[in-house]
Image: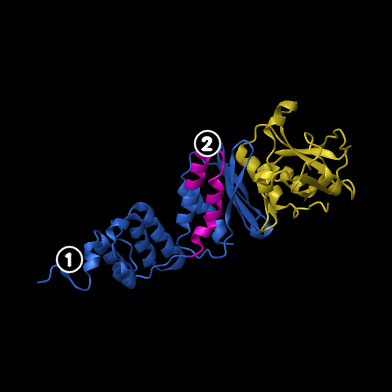
Chain colours: A blue, B yellow
Amino acid sequence: MILKNEETTRNLIYSVPGLVEMEKSFDQIIITGSHNSLAEFDSYFASRIRKNVTDYGQEKQADILKYYLLTQPQAFNNFSEVASKYIFLRSPSRENVTQLARVTLESTSNREVAKRAIIILDIIENQLQSFDISTLPPIRIAELEDERVIIEWIFENFRMGFNLELDDDESGYFQISDKSAGEIRSSGYLKGLKLEVLIRSLLTLVLNN
Amino acid sequence: MVNFPDFCIRGIVKKSYIYEDTETVSAALFIPDSRTRVTRSDEGTETSINWDDNDKVLEFTLQTRDEKNQAVLAFPHGAIKLPRHVLDDVVNLPSTFQAITYERQEIDNNPYHGNIVFRAGIPQHTINMIANVLAAHSSRPYRSDT
């Protein structure tokens, strides 16, 4: 009898804690289209999976593997076998969406405000991982004279972003668009909102235009 | 009754308020100066503009000298034009109803000067949203030929 961790074709799979369960989940998703076996994943990523299925009618295995790689990198000394089994996607422009803003934030005056801006950039970047964003413009940072910061994402027909105030209770978000994109005018405080949920909502405008 | 032309002009003090690659401007260009609150009886805050009363006002704006140092331009990075109807839209739309006003306010050596006035008490995120509307409808930056 060959122990599971000695199987020649799948030893790396078994050497990584949790990966077998993930693979079973993939198989169940592929075979049945069901998403009942998501107990192994945290709730956030589970919602991502459901959203992908809703948007695209199919699962993206690479996203799940990528998530695992990002959260458990120490488990992989050599993942070539895994990579050959699962397509590993990374948009080359993904970082470019936030890179300019990150560079600008390195030299803004108020480090506390900059930290809060980076958190927002991280969430945006994370939530865009599943999408083709090769045509998206870069996010930009404008620093006001009193050290406040505006995060701006400027498109042809709309703008969205955040105002980060010295008093964080006053920080907010906005989105505006012209008539061709619904003539939206909305803004509000960040306080009391879950940033991940808010940003996902704002990204709807980005990804649908 | 005060007459207003179809456009106003906003000078650009900071280079970082222009995104050169797309020739767009940041909302920061229209964020009002909070220090002006104490000078107004209505406690509003002002974004300074010139009214485009004739075809010389743009060049006049571009050539305006810095108050503290006459050797340098007040707006070294140019100026933009903004249609007045955009201001009226902001005033009249339900989401920003009467959140701003605009006015003439002549000052020494500048008969064209005026202000976009953000009403006292409106949240910063609303100010930011309005500033973005104004930035989105601004012209490409004009620059002095000299």
* Residue A159 part of the magenta segment: no
> Magenta span: helix, strand or loop, mainly?
helix
Judged from the image, the secondary structure of the residue bearing numbered disc 2 is helix
On the question of residue B94 being in view, the answer is no
Judged from the image, the secondary structure of the residue bearing numbered disc 1 is helix
Q: Amino acid at mark 2?
A: Asp
Q: Is the residue A19 above or below the residue B92 in the image? A: below
Q: Is the residue B23 above or below the residue A117 in the image? A: below
The span shown in magenta is A92-119
Is A91 left, or right, of A176 in this rendering? Answer: left
* Residue A114 part of the magenta segment: yes
In three-dimensional space, the C-alpha distance between marks 1 and 2, rounded to whole angstroms, equals 51 Å
Q: Is the residue A89 above or below the residue A121 in the image? A: below
Camera-nearest residue between B29 and B46: B29
Is A69 left, or right, of A135 in this rendering? Answer: left
Q: Position of residue A117 (x, y in %)?
A: 52, 45
Which residue is pictured at 70% across the width and 56% down the height?
B23
Q: Position of residue B85 (x, y in %)?
A: 78, 49
Q: Few, some or many C-alpha atoms within 10 Å of disc 1 (few <14, some 14-19, many ≥20)?
A: few
Q: Chain for mark 2?
A: A
Q: Which residue is outermost to the left?
A: A1
Per the rendering, the mark at residue A168 is 2
Q: Amino acid at mark 1?
A: Asn
Find disc 1 in the rendering and name its residue.
A5
Locate the C terminus of chain A by quadrant: bottom right
Q: Nearer the viewer, mark 1 or mark 2?
A: 1
- Total numbered badges shown on the rendered structure: 2
- Tell me whether marks 1 and 2 sit on the same chain: yes
Tell me whether circle 1 and circle 2 mark residues in contact (CB < 8 Å): no
Which residue is pictured at 66% across the width and 44% down the height?
B28
Q: Chain for mark 1?
A: A
